[in-house]
Amino acid sequence: MEVLHDIVAARPLEGYQIRVTFDTGESGVLDCTRYLAHPYWSRLKDKSFCDMVRVDYRTLTWPDDIVI
């Protein structure tokens, strides 16, 4: 069984990438381009909006309750 870890920090990078840090101290880069074609995440196409990423309740969120 795979254990899921909580996201504790997120920092926007170039393009549509976000550096994500987990409660274990490990980090990685999430490439959001795969979400851009879906209507739910279409607002992320606006790079300035995409850069508004924050961590709420251990997950990535944006204004208007958009969640990944």
Image (tube, helix red, strand yellow):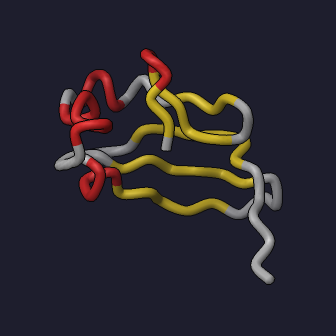
Above or below, 17 against 60 in this view is: below
Number of residue marks: 0
Residue 9 image offset from top left, x and y in percent: 66, 40
Q: Residue at x 55, y 62 (%)?
A: 28
Q: Residue at x 38, y 44 (%)?
A: 13
Q: Nearer the viewer, residue 23 or 62?
A: 62
**Outermost residue, bottom side:** 1
Q: Quadrant of the N terminus?
A: bottom right
Q: Residue at x 19, y 35 (%)?
A: 45
Above or below, 22 against 42 in this view is: below
User: Is residue 45 toward the left or the right of residue 2 in the image?
Assistant: left
Q: Quadrant of residue 64?
A: top left
Q: Nearer the viewer, residue 51 or 40?
A: 40
Residue 8 image offset from top left, x and y in percent: 73, 42
**Outermost residue, top side:** 64
Residue 54 image offset from top left, x and y in percent: 56, 28
Residue 42 image offset from top left, x and y in percent: 22, 35
